Amino acid sequence: MSAPAPTAGATATGRAPARQVLSLYDEPGPRARRRIRIWSVVVVLALLGLVAAGLVQFGSRGQLAADRWTPFLSWPVWQYLLVGLWGTVRAAALVAVLGGALGLVLALGRLSPVRPVRWAATAYIEVARTVPVLLLIYLMLFGLPQLGLDLPLIWKLVVPLTVANSAAFAEIVRAGILGLPRGQREAGLSLGMTSAQTTRKVVLPQALRFASPSLVTQLVSLVKDTSLGYIVAFTELLYRGQVLSSFNHLLIQTFVVVTLIYLVFNGALSTLAARLRTRPGRRTPRGPGTRAVPSAAVLGVPATDRPATDRPATADPATDRPTTGGAPS
Amino acid sequence: MDLFVDGAGPLLSALGTTVLLAVVAGVGALVLGTLVAAARISPVPVLRGAAFAYVQFFVNVPLLALLILAVFALPDAGLILPLAPTAVLVLALYEAAYVAEAIRSGVNTVGHGQVEASRALGLTLGQTLGLVVLPQAFRAAVQPLGNVMIALTMNTALAAAVGVVELTSAANKLNLVEAQPILIFTAAGLLYMVLALAIGLGAGRLERKVAILR
C-alpha cells in the first residue's frame, strides 16, 4: 500500500474532506501497468473522438469560421463584457457581505438557548433553503411594486440572493461551530467569561477559520447565482452576453466566451478553497490527540518504533498529496 | 377565491412537470455522477483527470449560462432537441458533478481496513469498488445526496428562464393574468417546500435504514 498519508485538513460540512486518503489499489505491477496504459489509450481516443465529433458538427454549420471568433479578440467586445463582470462582482460582493452577516446571526440564533429565537432562525433557514431563488426574484419583481415598494435594479437581484444565501452561510457557520471540540466553550466559560464573550472571542474565531473552505465554496455558488441578473435585466456578465449576442448574432461564440469567463473567475475561487482545505493554517483546530503524537515521540518512544503513519502530517508536505485523486474541490 | 379555482389546475399540472423534470434529471444525475466518481478514483490517470475536469467545469459555471447555451445557442450548430429534454439533459449533466462530489466524500469515509481486507482476499479493483467500497460510500452519502437532490429540484425552476412551463413559469403566467403576485408566488413556494420536505424526509428515512454505525 502506497503512502497512507493522513492529511490534516478536515472540513466542517463534510464536503470532500482531505483528511483520509484511501488507496484502492497496490503499486501496479507490470501487467497492471500495461492494463492502465491500454485503458489510458482507450480513454484518450474516446475523448478525442468526442471532441472531433463536436468540431465536425460545429464546422459543418460554419461555426468554426475564423471571422466568427475574431470579434472576441478585439478590445471593445472585452470592455463590454468586463463591464458585465464588474456588475457580477459588485452584486456578488453585496450578497456576500449582507448574506454573510445575516448568516452569522442566523447560525447563532439557531444555536441559541432561547427557544423562540431558535425556532425563528430554524424556520427562516428551512424556508429560505427550500424555495427556488427564481421564485424569490419573481416575488421581488412583481410583488413588492404592488405594495408600493420599488427598489433600484441591483437590489431586486441582491435581496433575493441574500435571502437564499444567508441560509446557506448560516448552515456552514453552524457546522463550523458544532465541529469545534466542546471543551473550547467550556474552557471559556470556566475562565469566567460570559457566554457572549466566549462566543465572540473563543468559539467564532476558530469556527470561522474551520469553515473557511466551505465559505469560499459557497462564494462560488453565490457568484453563479448572480447570473440570475439575466432575469431582472441587471447588468451582469450573462445579461451582457445576452445583449451582445442579440447585437452581433454570434450566439454560440458569445455564450462560450461568457461560460469560459465564469469558469476562469470561479475556478480561481475554487482553487483558493482547495488550498484552504489541504493547507489549513497552523491555528486550525484539529481533533484531539493529533498534536500529542510528536511530543510523545520526543518524550521517550524510540524513533524506530514510531509507525510511519503517526508522523505529524504537516511536517512533510510531500506526503500530503492525495494518491487516489486530484485536489479536492 | 376565484383565484384558487382558476389557478389550481395550471399550477398542479405544472407541479407535475416540475416533479417529472426533477425525477428524470435526478436519476440521470445519480447514474452519471456515480460513473464520474468511479472515474475520479480509478487507477487510470487520464480517466481521473477527465473526471476532475468534468467536476470542475460544472461546479464553476452557472446553470443558467449552460441552459441558455444549450437551448438558444447550440441549435445554430445543428444540435437541437425538444425543449424539455434539453433542460433535463443539462440539469442531469450539471448535478452529476455534485453527485460525484457527494459520493467521493462518501468514499473517503470508508475505512482503510475495508479496502485492505478486500485486497487481501484477492478481490480485483472492480470487485473492491463494486462490492465493498461503493455500497458503503452510498450509505454514508445518503444525506449529502439528498441535499443535492433538493438543490436539483430547486434548480428545475431555472428551466422557466428558457421557456419550459414548470411550476415557477406557470406561477409567473398565472400572475400575469390574475395580478396577485404575493399570493400566487407564495403558493408556488409552498409547493416547492413540500417537494423539498418530501425529499429530505425520504433521505432521512433511508439513512436511518441503511446507515452503518461505526
Image (spheres, coloured by chain):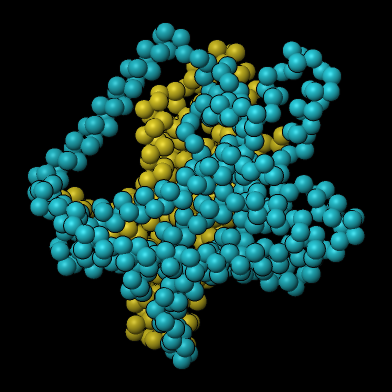
Chain colours: A cyan, B yellow
- When asked about the image quadrant of residue B133, the answer is top right
Does residue A143 lie above or below A194 as drawn? below
Residue A101 versus residue B85: which sits nearer the camera? A101
Q: Is residue A329 visible?
A: yes
Residue A199 versus residue A162: which sits nearer the camera? A199
Does residue A2 lie above or below A131 as drawn? above
Give the quadrant of the C terminus of chain B: top right
In the drawing, does residue B114 fall left or right of residue B23? Answer: right
- Identify the residue shown where x is 57% and y is 38%: A278
Does residue A229 lie above or below A54 as drawn? below
Q: Is residue B72 visible?
A: no
Q: Position of residue A321 (x, y in %)?
A: 54, 29
In the drawing, does residue B58 fall left or right of residue A270? Answer: left
Residue closest to the far bottom? A148
- Identify the residue shown where x is 55% and y is 12%: B122
Residue closest to the far top? A30
- When asked about the image quadrant of residue A54, the answer is top left
Q: Position of residue B104 (x, y in %)?
A: 52, 37
In the drawing, does residue B125 fall left or right of residue A308? Answer: left
Does residue A175 lie above or below A166 as drawn? above
- When asked about the image quadrant of residue A124, the answer is bottom right
- Identify the residue shown where x is 43% and y is 86%: A150
- Identify the residue shown where x is 37% and y is 15%: A35
Q: Position of residue B64 (x, y in %)?
A: 35, 60
Count of residue discs: 0
